[in-house]
Image (spheres, helix red, strand yellow):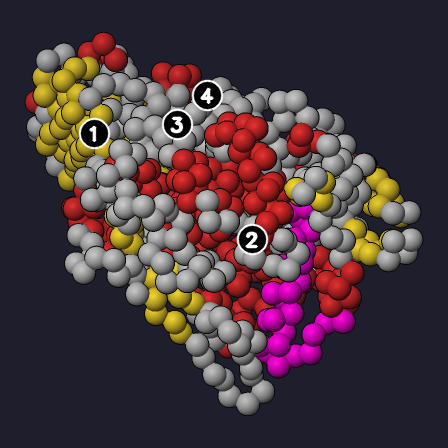
Amino acid sequence: MIVSISLAWKKGFTLFLPVLSLITIYTSTAFSQPINRFSLINRHNISIKAIDPLAPLSVGNGDFAFTADVTGFQTFENFYHKNGISLETMCTWAWHSFPNAKGYKLEDAMKEIDFHGRRIAYVNQEKSEAGAFFRQNPHPVPLGQISLLGKNNQRLEMESISNIDQKLDLWKGLLSSAYNVDGVPVMVETVSGADKSIVGFKIKSPLLKDGRLKPAIKFPYSYDLKTKNKPPFDWTGVERHRSSIISRNANKALIRREIDETVYFTLISWKGKADLIEDRDHEFHLEATEDNLEVTFEFSAAPIKNSTLFTAICTQSEKAWKDYWSKGGVIDFSGSTDPRATELERRIVLTQYLMKINYAGSFPPQETGLTHISWYGKHNSEVYWWHTAQFYEFNHTNLLEKSFNWYRKILPLAIAVAKKEGFEGARWPKMAGINGRPTPGEINPYIIWNQANPIYLAELIFRYKPNKATLNTYKDVVFESAKFLASYAWFDKKTDRYILGPPLKSVNESTDESETFNPSFELVQWHHGLKVAQQWRERMGLPKDRKWEEVLNKLSTLTIQEGKYVEMESDPEMYTRQGGYSSAMLMALGYLPKTEMVDTQIMSNTFDAIYQRNGLKSFVSWSLGKGAMTAARLGKQKEAVDILCNTLPGAVFLKNGHVQRAKEPLGCAAYLPANSAFLAAAGLMAAGWDGSGTTNAPGFPQDGTWKVRSENMNRLP
């Protein structure tokens, strides 16, 4: 069933979409019975039976996450960090900068480049001292390592752990860990708060009373940021930070954390007879006198007055997760005869869980979310559409809006950056921390496929809430983004057309920025972005912008060679070179909806050539989404499903649902753009898109091998 919602507004406020409805909420009608959501989600609960550094499990809420090993704590962090996925306690709001002792300025990391006859200072000197400083700063604060100590206050040894039986209840967001320590049973429950930066534990074991098991927290100074991805904690220089107990009573203690100019607070609360002991600087543990102990650790930018007990956190978590699973979109493959159906369903459900934990916060996420730090904790905005469009598709548009509002906050800075470079509108940072300041990089200033993303995402929000309030809320982001698109496009009088670049780095980031121009995908992005922005003006009763219309009418067309699109006009042979897997041009139809810029048959030829040359090798990591979406829109359902079910390196979904980054699997062991792009494609294939008709699950083969049911899904344009 497709439910269409169209609005007619009062005089002076018109609707520009005369044919398409603004939102389609899709529920498949191929089956009469509603999906049993409880059964769907719970059949993919995660079970861990052995210590596996690639299978830690997380609890969280989008603004906070805690990742645990098999003990339910972060007891074996060193082993997990070295061999797999780090165990971290992270949030979106706590950031730190090393002291700027030498007084670096961002201008010290700039170098002028030529932009069609004028000089622009770009922040491109990442290897300079100033560049290195501003790449590292600001970075997220590691909130603390929460572990279990054994006898003599020593960290438990892995050899002492046996009979492991750990389960993540996805419906409740509850992690249960049962195991033996030196033959003695231990049971731990771990849960995160629904809207606070808090993690709670319930521990039951005779070892507690015997003093051979003690929950503990240890605060590092920061990260050792010699490496940009998965850096270790910095435990050195204890004098550079302070951890002070500023209040305490029989069942709680408030710790003030000071790391240079960063200040935050940690409230440790417990139910049961126990004493908080300060072992040494920055290290604390609880000594219990009973076999049961409940303890919570809450983190906040301001002092915390009231404790939240473990039982309350459990109740809040269960309600929040039930709402998430019950009200959002779901896809059910039960009844399918294709042997890959169960695994594909598992990938979708676990990715939905990971998206809620890692990407549903108030700050656009880093590529590893809140699981572990990467790229110095910075947000890479070119993949932001992949990160959050899936929230719209799966009927959680409120979670898309939550982080999208950060763009409204940094809009004045983005306008100032554009003005300084001689452009109109807002130039969004390719890579930025919480402050929105551009990060130095040899690639960063030349990436442009991030600039149209805010327009596309704002349009998705409007499709969900097609009203005047939505337009007024996000019009500045849309219009200032469009101003930059039109201003950045350079008019070549010789050919009577607008071109993009140079300098420019296309999606593949491998070409010389001084020679690259007119990448195919970015050209279509520019066209789509400006066209949507014009629609926003008309919806608000405003005339079309003349400059935007001029760019639309004279924008360069895509380069075609032998009946296929090339990746860029400046290097038409690039994607056909020996060993080349480049395929960014596919996003011009797939990631983007059908536009007059793209000929469907030529794009079909292009897809076929890439698929026949490299097969599934071209579609790993976040290209899972890129390839599957294009295949689906082209009617190539078999290829779309084959891509989603890919099992090559870079497309393997681990026990916890994470996908390792193909380029450096242990450097970015949890590479979430692969998950989010995959989920965006799955949503498109199940719910369809504007123009896909009434066929159930139009992105899947219609030969009877796939029985696809979906509920509460939103179609993409």
* Residue 531 located within the stretch drawn in magenta: yes
What residue is pinned by disc 3? Answer: 647
Amino acid carrying mark 2 in the image: Leu
What residue is pinned by disc 4? Answer: 666
Residue 693 figure quarter: bottom left
Distance (Cα) linking label 3 and label 2: 26 Å
Amino acid carrying mark 3 in the image: Thr
Callout in the foreground (1, 2): 2
What residue is pinned by disc 1? Answer: 47
Kindly report the secondary structure that dominates the magenta region of the rendered protein: helix
Marks 3 and 2 close (CB-CB < 8 Å) = no
Tell me which label, 4 or 3, sits earlier in the chain.
Answer: 3
Chain part drawn in magenta: 519-546
Q: Is residue 41 left or right of residue 371?
A: left
Residue 612 in sight from this viewpoint: yes
Q: Is residue 578 above or below residue 629?
A: above
Labelled disc at residue 499: none
* Label 3: which secondary element: loop
Marks 1 and 4 close (CB-CB < 8 Å) = no
Tell me which label, 2 or 4, sits earlier in the chain.
Answer: 2
The location of residue 578, given as percent across then percent down, is: 66, 22
Tell me which label, 1 or 4, sits earlier in the chain.
Answer: 1
The location of residue 3, given as percent across then percent down, is: 34, 70
Q: Residue at x 26, y 18 (%)?
A: 51
Distance (Cα) linking label 2 and label 4: 32 Å
Tell me which label, 3 or 2, sits earlier in the chain.
Answer: 2
Distance (Cα) linking label 1 and label 4: 22 Å
Distance (Cα) linking label 4 and label 3: 18 Å
Q: Nearer the viewer, residue 557 or 210?
A: 557
